[in-house]
Amino acid sequence: MESKSSTTGNRDNPNRNLHGSKTMMASHFLRALFRIQQTSTSSSSAGRSRRIRRAAYASMAYSAGTRRAWSRALLRKLRSRARLRFPRRLSRAATPQRRDMDQAQVLRKLVPGGPSMDDCKLLEETADYIRFLTTQVRLMQTVMDSVSS
Amino acid sequence: MSGRRSRISEEEIKELISKLRFLLPETSRQGGSRASAAKLLQETCNYIESLHRDVDDLSDRLTELMATMDISSAQAEIVRSLLRS
């Protein structure tokens, strides 16, 4: 549970420490940020924002590696240079309360690699994806806070 | 398709659902164990969508910040903050 390595066993341990992954995520993301700042003098700010966003998902995927279906799917998308899109639901008014089945389908569209997962795998992958996403968001917030202070 | 098991037990689903509930922010956890699976899935979808939005927003804000500040000069401070967090 307190293991520092994120690549050894314990993949079913719900309390698996993200320590090793966090470090990889941070170093990958920071390197990308420095590169983006240096090489983006002539591009639009929208373009730079897209690159940062891409770097965020890349750091998540690289630090999770190939252990997870969601990270494998993300890595495939990143390598194919395809646009990274996640579906956004329309306004709440347009989407009435749905049955169980439909919620699982909505979830499948939000988690990379979702469509090919059965319900059980979907729940596991979702939990892992959320852990990495929240870590990445906190990382970005920390960078924001420390640079702007 | 489903691997080793031909049938997923109720127990396993319950366990995965409680694990998932644990990951959602406090305000999304409604009514403890009485919350239906459907409600939990919906909250999970909402949460993931808000995290995706956070990544987008923070990317925009970092872009703005980097337009005026050289972040490599703030490297030491960034690393210090990360080690603290």
Image: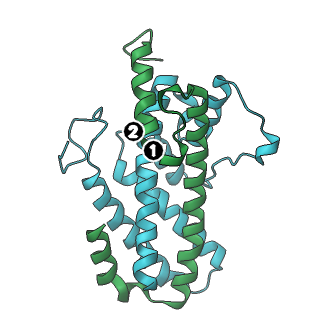
Chain colours: A cyan, B green
**Pointer 1 with pointer 2, Cβ within 8 A:** yes
Which numbered disc flags the more N-terminal residue, 1 or 2?
Answer: 2
Mark sitting on residue B85: none
Image location of residue B55, percent across then percent down: 54, 61
Question: Element type at marker 2?
Answer: loop
Q: Position of residue A123 (x, y in %)?
A: 47, 31
**Is residue B44 or residue A133 the one in the foreground?**
B44
Within 10 Å of the Cα at label 2, are there few (<14), some (14-19), or many (20+) other Cα atoms? some
Q: Is residue B54 above or below residue A143?
A: above
Q: Amino acid at mark 1?
A: Tyr
Residue at 40%, 34% (x, y): give it. B19
Judged by depth in the image, the label closer to the viewer, 1 or 2, is 1
Q: Residue at x 28, y 40 (%)?
A: A15
Residue A51 position, x and y percent, is 55, 68
- Write down the residue under mark 2: A68
Q: Which mark is residue A129?
A: 1
